[in-house]
Amino acid sequence: MEALLARAREYIPEDKLGVIEDAYRFAEFAHDGQLRMSGEPFIEHPLQTAMYLADLKLDSSAIAAALLHDVLEDCEEVSYADLEGAFGNEIAHLVDGVTKLTQTEAISEERDSALRLTPADGLAQAATLRKMLMTMAEDIRVVLIKLADRLHNMRTLDSLPPERRRVFAQETLDIYAPLAHRLGIWEAKWQLEDLAFQHIDTDSYRAVSDLLASKRVEREEYIERIIGLLQAELRQAGIKAEVSGRPKNIYSIHKKIRKYAEQNRSADEIYDLFAVRVLVEKVSDCYGALGAIHSRWYPIPASFDDYIANPKDNLYRSLHTVVLAEEANPVEIQIRTFEMHSVSEYGVAAHWLYKEGGASDVQFEEKMTWLRQLLEWQRDVSSAEEFVESFKTDIFNDQVFVYTPKGEVKELPAESTPLDFAYRIHTDVGHRCIGSKVNGKLVSLSYRLQIGDTVEILTSKTERGPSLDWLNPDSGYVRTGSARSKIRQWFNRQERDANLAQGREIYNKQLRRLTTEMDNIDLAELTGFETRDELFIALGNGTITVPQVVNRLTAEDVSPQPEEPIKLPTVGPAAGIEVMGVGDLLTRMAGCCNPIRGDAIVGYITRNRGVTVHRPACPNIIAEDEKERLVPVGWGESHEVYPVRVRLEAWDRVGLLGDVTTMVSNERVNISNCVSEPAHGMTVITLTVYVKGIDQLNVLFSKLEGVKGVVSIDRVRSGT
């Protein structure tokens, strides 16, 4: 405690330190006798959490809340009222924002959710995150306490069992490291990433560590030479600067190596292993230093970014350039002021609104508008799981900056579309959208916006309402969770009967055509609905989409199961088929019914060709007298493809067949046979395609329906 008070005393007035000491005493008493799994006294954890916040120079209330952040969760005798009585509403509210919900509370909050596919523990996690994020929107200190809490937990993760370590580390990598990045707290981000990576993929972590160690001496010598040359160049230009090497964290290098491997490039080509940072006093010196650097070394084209003129949404400001330095080695150089560097390291904490005696920061308020949007999304999203997914999509993804016709800058997640832009402007603009122009040219509503695009939305005079196709992920019309929520909300307002009819039509048109054995399973129960009508309504209003149902069907093993199923390795030419309860047998797919991944299947033991795999509705299986020769089989892992006959009806026109085959090719699906025949002014095209399973077949159907003139498309049953 004395060490904590010493750090806090550096910037907090003496009369504010008492609440920190009182909070420590309260937490120490509440946690008395409790030990962490590492064996150390429990009070050590909240103390280290508070120490990190003191390093960030947060206010006394935040540090006190950090010391108390576990008392509501882990000390049954302490209530919210106790905290409020002892420390006031502000500190009690901060502690409550960080406290996890119990599983019972989480399930209670989710009882009205339309789609109940998430296990109880998943609901608890989603509801906890939702609560934290919503409280964070009101007071950013909540998430800073949570990040400090998570950082110390990750540093002491070795005391947990291996499986819990991996789950905890994965959540850190998925949620908390991106959150630290979005808040601009680079120091916390890279530590969380490396600590999580170490537990998720130990072998890769060691491989990258060994790679860096093997090249460390060589790299450090080269960087020192570059620093010396750069300092001399800046002195000659009359610019006072501090130049240093910039370390790269292990996880970021791992991602770079993986990206290069996909491009058939080696790790030796990763240029930003050589990185230098230049710190100067004034903004004008940043641009002066940039000129001096470019006069010394040749800049690599398209490698310059000006985040001073166009700051990132997490407050980050800097100049980035990559130059060909000595021995033609690419070197990444960042140029910023000392103040900008403080913000890059500590993000929102460097612009702290609640610092003791500090004034309100207008720039901070403007930049944190993305957090305030959470309050609006809270009203639009009913499910905690959907809220968290929306948050991950809209907040954690990389951002793209685009312009309105009036020159206003709008920030959207990368790969956003004009429809996402329309809904970001206003809900009514999205509902009335009938088209879009980008840089003065008409584009599709599924166009991916690029940095610098000027977007104009074409609207109808009256609200037409969104199209249900906009919710189909395969169509690619919307990418942001906020736009998707507003579209779903519109459909939820429509009449129940209309949604029921629409959903039944979708079911008959898109799900029944896949010819999975849906009559043999309770589809409604499988997807979390009490009746099929509820499922149809959810399909009709967009609460659940066709790909979600297909994924559930694909994941569900509807084959008969023995009491104690035995999982066997994949065998035979029909790779991916598991024969239950027996040794390895040769398997092959039946040519009479052509089952594909996702279909319900059954095995038939032949006399000399192993097991033949059929669909249960196959006439040969139904007519089989020797039922004892039928054995349960299931779909294992497979990368095999399966032949499927597809019948497509369309209005005849020039180029129809070419458009169809091009669309199939674009989906990376092979065609083994194609027949086109005229039929009463129309054309019937029959294709034999090879797909990986029902999910890919469903995507292919969705794409083919978009071909001009196509009226219907179905999977051809055996014998027709």
Image (cartoon, grey):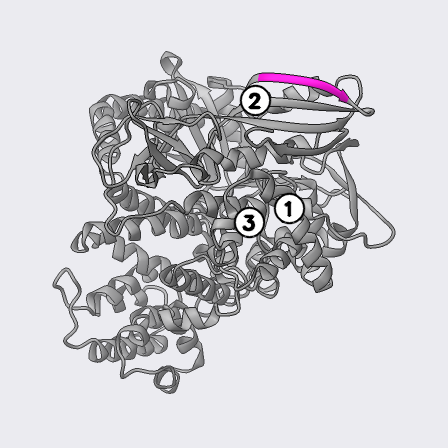
Give the farthest residue toward the right. Answer: 461
Q: Which secondary structure lies at badge 2?
A: strand
In this orientation, which residue lies closer to the viewer: 158 or 492?
A: 492
Residue 53 x/y as whole percent: 34, 61
Q: Which mark is residue 508?
A: 1
Q: Residues within 10 Å of mark 2 (few under 14, many from 20)?
A: some
576 to 363, vertically: above or below: above
Q: Quadrant of the C terminus?
A: top right
Q: Secondary structure at mark 3?
A: helix
Check if residue 248 falls in the magenta segment: no
Q: Percent x, y for residue 444?
A: 72, 34
> Tag 3: residue type?
Asp
Instruction: Give the answer, above or below, for where 719 lies relative to 428.
Output: above
Q: Amino acid at mark 2?
A: Thr
Instruction: Say left or right for 610 vs 505.
Output: left
Q: Quadrant of residue 590?
A: top left
In front of the other: label 3 or label 1? 1
Q: Quadrant of the N terminus?
A: bottom left
Q: Nearer the viewer, residue 209 or 500?
A: 500
Q: What amino acid type should be assigned to the residue bearing mark 1?
A: Asn
Q: Residues within 10 Å of mark 3 (few under 14, many from 20)?
A: many
User: Where is mark 3, residue-wise?
Assistant: 394
Q: CA distance from mark 1 to mark 2?
A: 22 Å
Label number found at residue 688: 2
Q: Secondary structure at mark 1?
A: helix
Give the magenta range: 673-678
The overriding secondary structure of the stretch rendered in magenta is strand
